[in-house]
Amino acid sequence: MDLKKFIIDVKDFPQAGVIFKDITPLLNDVDAFKYVIDEFTNFVKETGANVIVAPEARGFLFAPAIAYAAGCRFVLVRKPGKLPRAVNDVEYSLEYGTGHLQMHKGDLRENDKVVILDDVLATGGTMDGIIKLCHKESNVDIAGIACLIDLSFLHDDALAKEYNVKTLITY
Ligand SMILES: O=P(O)(O)OC[C@H]1O[C@H](OP(=O)(O)OP(=O)(O)O)[C@H](O)[C@@H]1O
Ligand SMILES: Nc1ncnc2[nH]cnc12
């Protein structure tokens, strides 16, 4: 399926110089959303993962549906001040900012096989942060990385060299 027709470029959002990829038309199309969920569900099953880890906000739009379809647990990564219990924390940077990401302590368990899922891979800063967060908790295996959109001109191939990376739209 040609998914690019469901992505709208928005210039200078959220700041000057950024071309923001708006995925809301894809969520607003039954067949396109189903196609994405099915593709990533197959990927998760192929990796043998038992947990999907995804960050707010846009990772949450896809991860629960895929976790349900693939029979996996779902673990949330959130921005500071949102998770009510003890957290692990990591500092990170992304295309248009910096911040912290957090995961509840105890959400990942020894020997979990994790697929990390997000909507956009831009600089890769968010993904690097999530990988570090996963390793802070316990001895987990990152079995795969799934991102709907790959902004390949914003990152090198370090992630692809080390991990099983699945993306559906490349710019
Ligand atoms: O590869 P990077 O340069 O790190 O950028 C990718 C991240 O940027 C966006 O998240 P954002 O922090 O804007 O959060 P949102 O989903 O809450 O809008 C996107 O959803 C990815 O998580
Ligand atoms: N250009 C972009 N569009 C949408 N989400 C993003 N996250 C980081 N860069 C982005």
Image (cartoon, helix red, strand yellow):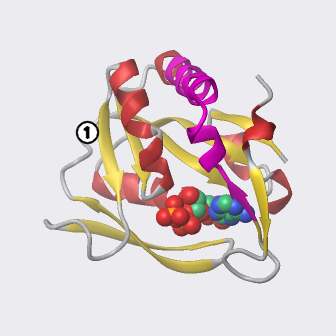
Look at the picture and state if 50 lies above or below 18: above
Q: Where is mark 1, residue-wise?
A: 110
* Residue 125 visible in this rendered orientation of the protein: no
Residue 47 or 15: which is nearer the viewer?
15
Left/right placement of residue 142 relative to residue 68 reads: right
Q: What's drawn in magenta, residue-wise?
A: 20-43
Q: Residue 59: where, in percent of width, then height?
A: 48, 49
Q: Position of residue 93 (x, y in %)?
A: 58, 74
Characterize the local packing of mark 1: few (<14), some (14-19) or many (20 or more) Cα atoms within 10 angstroms: few
- Residue located 42% across and 38% down the image: 63
Relative horizontal placement of residue 107, taking residue 115 as reference (left or right): left
Magenta stretch: dominant secondary structure: helix
Q: Is residue 107 left or right of residue 164?
A: left
Camera sees residue 49: yes
Decide which of 97, 109 is in the foreground and name it.
97
Residue 55 sits in quarter: bottom left
The residue closer to the viewer here, 163 or 32, is 32
- Check if residue 61 falls in the magenta segment: no
Q: In the image, what residue occupies the spot 26% across and 69% down?
A: 82
Position of residue 166 relative to residue 43, above or below, is below
Identity of the amino acid at label 1? Answer: Glu
Circle 1 — which element? Answer: loop
Q: Position of residue 162 (x, y in %)?
A: 65, 42
Q: Image quarter for residue 148?
A: top right
In percent of the image, x 57 and y 30: which residue is there? Answer: 33
Residue for point 54% across, 17% down: 42
Residue 53 or residue 135, whichever sits in front? 53
Quarter of the picture holding the N terminus? top right
Is 21 colored magenta in this rendering? yes
